[in-house]
Image (tube, helix red, strand yellow):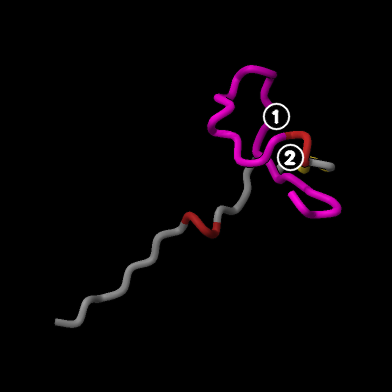
Amino acid sequence: MAGTVTIAEVEEIVDLGQLDPDEVHLPGIFVDRIVVVPNPEKRIERKSFRTRNL
């Protein structure tokens, strides 16, 4: 919210009213640019496991 320029990377643009306002993390008033990436690589969503030493 304190940034000079805010860029939102989105998978798709939906019509007004399709999203629950409580699930929006950054209101559109703060977004200056939108980049649509239909099939993004979601690195943060990959799970990694390590072996447990007993």
Tell me the residue at 69%/18% (across/down): 16
What is the quadrant of the C terminus in the image?
A: bottom left
User: Residue 23 versus residue 43: which sits nearer the camera?
Assistant: 23
* Residue type at numbered disc 1: Ile
Tell me the residue at 77%/41% (across/down): 30
Direction from residue 22 to residue 35 in the image, left or right? right
Q: Is residue 16 above or below residue 29?
A: above
Q: Residue 41, percent across and down?
A: 59, 53
Looking at the image, how many numbered discs can be counted on the residues?
2
Q: CA distance from mark 1 to mark 2?
A: 8 Å
Residue 5 within the magenta-colored segment of the rendering: yes
Q: Main secondary structure of the magenta part?
A: loop
Q: Which residue is situated farthest in the bottom direction here?
A: 53
Any mark on residue 36, and which?
A: 2
Marks 1,2: beta carbons within 8 A: yes
- Asked which quadrant contains residue 27, the reply is top right
Direction from residue 13 to residue 20 in the image, left or right? left
Tell me the residue at 77%/43% (across/down): 35
Any mark on residue 45, and which?
A: none
Q: Is residue 14 above or below residue 35?
A: above
Q: Which residues lie in the magenta part? A: 1-27
Tell me the residue at 22%/76% (across/down): 52
User: Residue 2 versus residue 38: which sits nearer the camera?
Assistant: 2
The residue wearing badge 1 is: 13
* Secondary-structure class at tag 2: strand
Q: Which residue is situated farthest in the front direction here?
A: 2
Q: Residue 42, percent across and down?
A: 56, 53
* Secondary-structure class at tag 1: loop
- Asked which quadrant contains residue 36, the reply is top right
Q: Residue 2, percent across and down?
A: 77, 53
- Asked which quadrant contains residue 32, the reply is top right
